[in-house]
Image (cartoon, coloured by chain):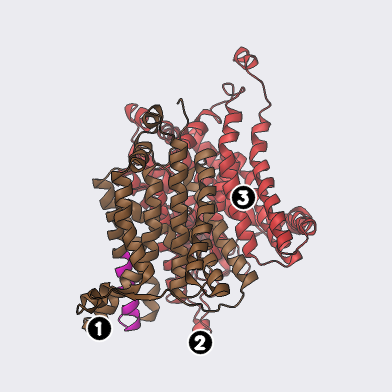
Chain colours: A red, B brown
Amino acid sequence: MAQAETNRRSRPKFVAYLVPLGAVVLALAIGAIMLSLLGANPVEGFRAMLDGAFGSGDALIETALKATPLLFVGVGITIAFRANVINIGGEGQMVAGALLATALALALPDLPAVVMLPTVLLAGIVGGAAWGAVPGALKAYYNVNEILSTIMLNVVAVQLMNFLLRGPMIDPGELERGTRIPQTARLQEGADLPLLFGNGRLHIGPLIAVLAAVAAYILLWRTPLGFRVRAVGLSPDAARYAGIPVKRTIVLAMTMSGAMSGLAGAVLVFGSESHRMVTDGSTVGFTGSAGFNGIVAALFGGLHPIWTIPASFMFGGLLVGGIALQRAVQVPSALIMALNGLVVVFVVASDRWKKRLQEQPARVDDTATDGPVLEAVVDDGGGGP
Amino acid sequence: MSEFFTQAVLIAAVASGIRLAVPLLLASLGETYGQRSGVLNLGVDGIMLLGAFGGYYTVLKTDNVWLGLAMGIGVGVILGLVSAVISVTLKAEQGISGIGIYLFGLGMSDLLFQKLVGTPLPVGSFPKLDIPGLSDIPILGEMLFRHSIIVYVAFGLVPISMYIINRTTFGMNIRAVGENPEAADSLGVSVVRIRYLTVTIGGMMAGIAGAALAIDLGIFQQNLTNAQGFIAIALVYFGAWRPAGVMAGSLLYGFVNSVVLQFKTLGIIPRSWSDIAAMAPAIITILALVLVARRFRQPAALTKPFTRGT
């Protein structure tokens, strides 16, 4: 191995990880141009951004909270992508998980807190899992392109959310007052996510997300199921030949992927400041595009659950900082959405370069945790067979 | 329910269904070119939104709907080229990069609207054209031949696209590149050039679709398209990558939407259930995808970037 390496140009491994960072910088540079065109001072804006994301203890807590759904979704995306399934349905799965969890919290108000919290979080997992299992099964058994089916299920989920929050699940107080804001009543206190330091904003959500990432790592690389998932992602034909139930594995991977997003949705609701589920009529209003941004975090982390932890934190900082930037230089928040889109495009577009760099030395002595699987999974990515 | 089955309401429902099908038809016809050549452009909705704003803003300033449409074309061509750079040259994962383009278009169109317009001012719409003779046919004439010009343009593009894709050398190259890029490449067809052309055509059509939508409605607002761009992509699957099939799908959608609208106005669907009714298009799409996937095969190279020598 060592000889093979010296024969090639040797390049430290971290260089490959600089590529997505460069992509973000490029997107931000375009953002600077846009800010200038809007008559705002980009330097002032970016200083506010950095400060708002990482500048203080409170900022770091905000960033950690913003990173939490990204990490959940990112971990879920990693599981799906490793099985070569492109799950674009994180948004809908988050909503589905949040809805089921909220419905349960509303339906069982008398549950003691010890049982309440695990129950509603489990409901989030189940809701997201169901929303993920459907496109998984459609792909495995009916050959339906999962990109399209997950996008359509996002649309269905948002309508379901609007229907439920405007009707059956609306806060009775809203009906009495006639204000009809589409939101639930304040949910049972027993379902509030416990705060880490007794007070302040930081709840146990980020901790659960990190644990989920570690669990996903163990699942993917230390269990037979994880091995099957990765084998199916590498080569479905070889996996089938080896006796792996390919279809069932695809459905399972999508189910687990959806479960993670569903948990993200539940954590968003029970960790929110208002402790209600609210809709502004759009998915983005509830998820903050975490269902999409989680994909970027996962790509950033090289489709590795552990690396997705710092990647999500960084991306969360970008989003929190974006809000600070927007406030500091008084530009419409739509700019953040546009910049967010640019970051997605640039990071995804740079992914191939990153892989090309990784294909250089230091590949073979990588343990099974990185490298070849990633190459194959993303190379063959895209539509169904 | 009986209120729906009157002649006037039915004629209006069919006519408005045809009208509602137009943006979907334009966008999905364009996307057909790209997918036939092996590129899935998921950014259609974002391009539509920017085309919609460009078209709307131009009409607002110049009061000329054709300049508005031209602006839609311009915006679409530029964003189509950008999409081509991303998916053909940079070989980005098409399922995700398109989402980035969508988010960009969603944010950018809203940003431009807030900065340049602010309050939603209505603009003039496309002129109507009653086809002489045909529009006088009872019932049928009212349904089919009393539309604005853009409607005839959109449906006129269907046979033109059929001809281009099935009968011209360019069309043959598109299909070859989408089915077997290696073979096409070895025969001297430039995979990159063909895909740049098809993705740019797709972007252009999405831009036109957006402009047509905004000008037809005479307004712009945040997220005007409401995911129609994604439906358009699904319609390409629905239509099994054939222009006529894509047209059938667009019409089905237009009709479903127009019936839902009529039901709402007539009070057949209670207001509180309108969100449930709004799920219909997405659910029909999923069911349609199941049916289509059993019968038709997608272009073999769809979503697979091409690298020579692999």
Towards the viewer: A280 or A40: A40
Give the residue type at disc 2: Glu
Whether the magenta-drawn stretch holds residue B258 is answered as yes
Give the residue type at disc 1: Ala
Report in which chain the residue with disc 3 lies. Answer: A
Q: In this figure, which residue is indicated by the disc labeled 3? A: A343
- The segment highlighted magenta reads B253-269
Q: In this figure, which residue is indicated by the disc labeled 1? A: B8
The answer to which quarter of the image holds residue A321 is bottom right
Res A176 label: 2
Expressed as whole percent of the image width and height from the top left, the position of residue B253 reads 32, 65
On the question of residue B50 being in view, the answer is yes
Q: Secondary structure at mark 2?
A: helix
Q: What's the CA distance linking mark 3 and mark 1?
A: 51 Å
Q: Is residue A179 above or below residue A238?
A: below
Q: Are marks 2 and 3 in contact (CB under 8 Å)?
A: no
